[in-house]
Image (cartoon, rainbow, N blue to C red):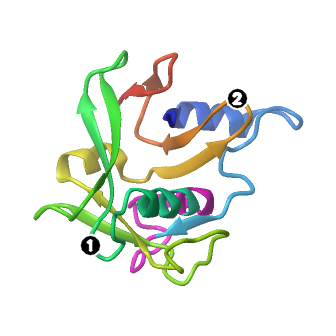
Amino acid sequence: MAMVTLQTETDRAAQAAAPAGGSKDPLAGMTVLTASGQSAEQKGIRITEKALKRIRVAMAKENVSPEQGGLRLGIQGGGCSGLSYNIRFDTQPRDRDRVYAFGEGVATAGDPTNGAPVRVFVDPKSFIYLHGMVLDFEETLMRQGFNFINPNSTKSCGCGSSFSS
């Protein structure tokens, strides 16, 4: 089971201000991808190369077509801090969804889709809380899962799967 963790903008600011040898920016050293047709200055959704690779592998495993389906990111009420993340595969976008395409022409090791772009769907209500966030995938000996680095969250719970804005 994949674990979802959260990092608030306050946490990121504290880490960035930490002295040398202390904690660092969570995006340091990562390749962050911007969606096709989106400039780096726009406040959309971004993903890391590690997340792109993991999404591609999971989509192939779940038989989700990259041409039709995609990864749905959302927010729902609940959790220790008021809001929690929702992540799942969907067969197609809904009418009012924002659709982002990532990774066209970006090869990842062991890519079962042969470099097909990955689509991410975000409904309008969730976009209010998710714009500007980066989706990463972390894999260590202790845990693995998607990590939402969200500048819109002001605090999170101890388990890291819910937040408030």
Residue occupying the point 51% across, 74% down:
103
Where is residue 64, by image quadrant? bottom left
The residue pinned by badge 2 equals 142
Where is residue 37, by image quadrant? bottom left
Is residue 69 found inside the magenta-colored segment of the image? no
Alpha carbon of mark 2 to alpha carbon of mark 1: how far? 34 Å
Label 2 crowd bin: few (<14), some (14–19), many (20+), radius 10 Å: few
- Side of 140 relative to 45 (left or right): right
Q: Residue furthest bottom?
A: 105
Residue occupying the point 55% across, 56% down:
54
Q: Which stretch appears magenta?
A: 35-52
- Above or below, 2 against 58 in this view is above
Q: Amino acid at mark 2?
A: Met
Residue occupying the point 38% across, 56% down:
62
Q: Position of residue 142 (x, y in %)?
A: 70, 29
The residue pinned by badge 1 equals 68
Residue occupying the point 21% across, 65% down:
92
Q: Amino acid at mark 1?
A: Gln
